[in-house]
Image (cartoon, rainbow, N blue to C red):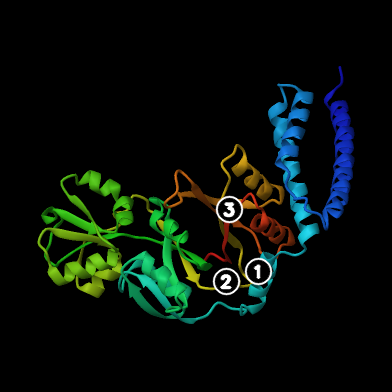
Amino acid sequence: MKDIAELRRDIDEIDDKIAELFLKRMDMMEDVAEAKKGSSASISDPARERLILSRVTNAVGEKHEDAARLLFRTMFGITKARQRVLLNGESEFAQTIKKAVAATSDKFPKRALVACPGVEGAYAQQAASRMFALPTIVYFNDFDKIFESVEKGLCPYGILPIENSAAGSVAAVYDLMQKHKFHIVRSLKLKIDHVLLAPKGTKLSDVKIIESHPHALAQCSEFFRAHSGIEMKPAINTATAAEALAANKTPGVAVIASRTCADLYGLEIIAERIQNAALNYTRFICIAKNPEIYSDANRIGIMLSLPHKPGSLNDIISKFSAIDVNLTKLESRPVPGMDFEFRFIFEFEASISDPSVLSLLADLATDPEIDRFTFLGAYSEK
């Protein structure tokens, strides 16, 4: 019996032969692409792919047919992507990205008119003040208005929360991404320290109702378990709830908000750090109408719909893996008005200036099997 060193030498020889055959197949694929020029032949031929998969899986037998199917489906994707480049040249998507990079200034602006949800003291306002040195902030009551103000050009930038380390994704924002046209130009992780605020003279034992944004309530679930007699009441924003309580001074009511709101609205802190986790962070994004891609951009976001067939999501993920790109988030959201159809939001660590990354995105943008591809932006996270 051969030892491990001999077996590995045998495998190396086989790998060399596979590489040689792969190169030969890619060369022949370029000949096929040349033959397709000027003809009505399409790049994708599903019927032929099915025949090939049937033939090779029969050849390898039941034991390895799943692995063979994965191998050949991956190879089909590689060859089709290469054919699209050879037949169509540089895509419109790639040209748009290059123009955006060239048109973006070297540094993120210090001054800007920024749309934020809530009122003064909201966590979104704190995020805006971290992203911009001197922001002029316009407040809106809901997330939809933030998107609209940017999309219609009323405000050059908007701030939105998308994820909390304890409560998860802000589903309402992800759902609105499907409705509006925008681009992410920056993101920020903001440390969240919730406090319980009430009118002066209120004791914790007096509190019957606590109002706050649903995400803030969820981040303090352990506090509510320890005080089971207190009712939770959702509000549109943490700071808005604090402002309203300061104006009304309703007995028995407290709010969960930031420490800043205590000073702003003359409320008293009756419990501190009431969130579940000591390290509690919310991610905020800054959006703009047009793509702005700064030199420090190290993250990319895209959104797309996939065909309802086995392996379609795996095909996309394997393409990222092939160029050593680390996916940091994968979110699926139902498409409004559609029967169990979903859009996928991908976020990953990469530079848009990397030719392999731009090539992959251009391929996804032009792939006829991918529906509603949207480039969300290339940005840095602070």
Q: Amino acid at mark 2?
A: Pro
Q: Are the two marked residues, 3 and 2, in contact with CB atoms closer than 8 angstroms?
A: no
Q: Residue at x 33, y 52 (%)?
A: 219
Above/below status of 23 relative to 177: above
Q: Residues within 10 Å of mark 3 (few under 14, many from 20)?
A: some
Q: Nearer the viewer, residue 316 or 30?
A: 30
Q: Secondary structure under badge 2?
A: loop
Q: Which residue is mark 3?
A: 371
Q: Nearer the viewer, mark 1 or mark 3?
A: 3
* C-alpha distance separating marks 1 and 2: 8 Å
Where residue 130 appears, as percent x and y from the top left, is: 45, 72
- Is 368 on the left-hand or right-hand side of 280? right
* C-alpha distance separating marks 1 and 3: 20 Å
Q: Amino acid at mark 1?
A: Ile
- Mark linked to residue 291: 2
Q: Which residue is mark 1?
A: 97
Where residue 310 appears, as percent x and y from the top left, is: 60, 37
Q: Nearer the viewer, residue 318 or 213?
A: 318
Along the polypeptide, which appears first: circle 1 or circle 2?
Answer: 1
Q: Nearer the viewer, mark 3 or mark 2?
A: 3
